[in-house]
Image: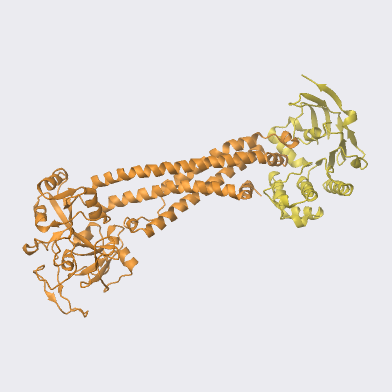
Chain colours: A orange, B yellow
Amino acid sequence: MNIFKLSYSYLKKSPLNTGLNILLLALGIATITSLLLFNNQFRNNLIQNAEGIDVVVGAKGSPIQLILSSIYHIDSPTGNISLEETHGVLMNPMVAEVIPLALGDSFEGYRIVGTERSYLTLYSAEINEGNFWEYSKEVVAGAKVAEKLQLSVGDSIISSHGIEEEGASHEDSPLIIVGILEESGSVLDQLLLTSVETVWDVHDHSDPDEDHEEEEHEEEDHHDEEHHDEEHHDHDEGHSEQRTKVSTEPMGFMTDDNLDKELTSLLITYRSPIAGAMFPRFINDQTDMQAAAPGFEITRLLSLLGIGFDVLRIFGIILILASILGVFIALYNAMKERKYDLAIMRTLGGSRVTLMAQILLEGVLLVLSGSILGILFAHFGIAFLSGSYQQAEQFNIDPWVFLPEEFLILGGAVLLGIFSALVPSIIAYRTSISTTLSK
Amino acid sequence: MHFFNLRHRYTRSKFTISYPDYTLNEKEHLLIVGGSGSGKTTLLHILSGLLKPTAGEVVINGTSMYELSEAGLDQFRRNHIGIVFQRVHLISALTVTENLALAQYLAKQPGNSGIINTLLSELGIEGKAKSYPNELSFGESQRVGIARAVINKPKILFADEPTSNLDDKNSEKVLMLLQQQAEKNEASLIIATHDERVKRHYDNVLDLDQEMIAEGEER
């Protein structure tokens, strides 16, 4: 027997009261902790995924939408830009590097991105299995996509039109997985990457009433897209479809024949930071496109979300305070019932300090178990949410990251536990043996 | 043990009671009798170190109890005194065994389940070891109360009205148990009671009704 066991026995004796207090506190702590975890990782992921991108150029529209769709792949693209328009961007002396993106298709809810090798370099992603694409209609899958959909090299997939839900499928243009990326912790994990030419090939025969660049299926043997291409009829599959080699040069697809084709956006790195002031103005004023700076838009987005976060945080704090009050009231009431217990324990030789320590310990145990439960709730909750929402997956939120702030929460909870048990423990300290026993 | 010049003034009623001086030798038993309101329980509390008297001294084994510090008195009680209360009041959150283990712990004795089990079977309640206090009959819980009072082998065992709620047969039994335990521990047994049935067992009787010098109300 010791005061730990004694405290535990007292808590166990009124399971409903104890349970309610623990649960209430756990909910409050869970709210605060999950906000902390989410906010922290969300912010980090926003920043990490935008690293190395100075500005995004795309069709006019909402700049946040452009950033969300082109960098994080979570919103619809703003529209398309023609190669002819982008030509001016490429030639601009302020621009150091350009990564083209052609969006619009998906497979099983995962986005297919037409781009170039430089997109992988941006996130230092490596091929884990298979090879990089050489021909049109070859696809490299992100690590998480491959894992979730159990894709392996050599599989062929039928992409569908549109990026959100199932659209019309491009039955006639199966794509082949030629490589699988290593997990990079970036947005690439959730994407299927291919050449810009693939996206064009799949959407050959443009459909003018489509607002995005993606058009209805039908791939025919169009020879206009590539020039240095050769036809391959020796493909192993029975489809005997034509395979065209794709360009390996940066923006190599940009030929006079292709000037009527379209891209979704360009991820751009400046030659010098000074361009940050001039380049967007140039794009926004002189062209039909818009330029959006990720840094600025992320800050804007976070400040918009910040209001929601604040409301939740206040809610969590109120829950915590209410439960601490609950712990206090429970202990305080218990003191009335337990005065006699305390007096008896004094007659058995228990000192005032021992009894005071026991009450304090009871408060600490209650609050500590509530806090630990709350932190577990938060991690399991995030694990559950990030597993059930694809939007959350996109941010690579890892539910099993433990932040140092969580230990702060634990420490703070212990302090609150001591605080809530302080008055009851002083009552215990002051209890007069004889008066109590003679009642 | 002896006590002298004991006076106690009740803070509520401002009533002062004076007690006769008395000396009790080692291993001797004493019966304190008197009607209700005669101050038996108060005297018992004073003698057992629970209540500091307004004046006077209680000396046990050469130690004047109320000259000890608070912590010193706690320690003295742990080592020398066991009390069986009129209302037993076991800790309801703990089982019988745990209640006794708590008594060992609070008296800073090493936890010893052997002692607990022996004591429970001596008192005939070994079957109730794992029961909670609300599952015990009055007689059973009183026996647990006796076990709790003697578990740390006190030099003086106090009992406050141990027979008041019992019929003749059971009150005999309880007195027997108390006496057995006191003798086993070579302890003095001091019983406060208004129960005439108890009187015939004891030679040393302190009758507060006769001896008490009530001083009336003082302002």
Q: Is residue B41 above or below residue A217?
A: above
Nearer to us in this view, A176 or A93: A176
Question: Residue at image x 43%, y 43%?
Answer: A315
- Left or right: A147 as drawn, with respect to A118: right
In this view of the protein, can residue B135 be seen by the observer? yes
Q: Quadrant of residue A174?
A: bottom left
- Left or right: B2 as drawn, with respect to A173: right
Q: Position of residue A92 (x, y in %)?
A: 9, 51
Nearer to us in this view, B60 or A228: A228
Question: Residue at image x 73%, y 44%?
Answer: B89
Nearer to us in this view, A200 or A39: A200
Q: Position of residue B90 (x, y in %)?
A: 72, 46
Q: Quadrant of residue A195?
A: bottom left
**Residue at far top of view:** B219
**Residue at far left of view:** A256
Q: Position of residue A385 (x, y in %)?
A: 39, 56
In this view of the protein, can residue A51 be seen by the observer? no
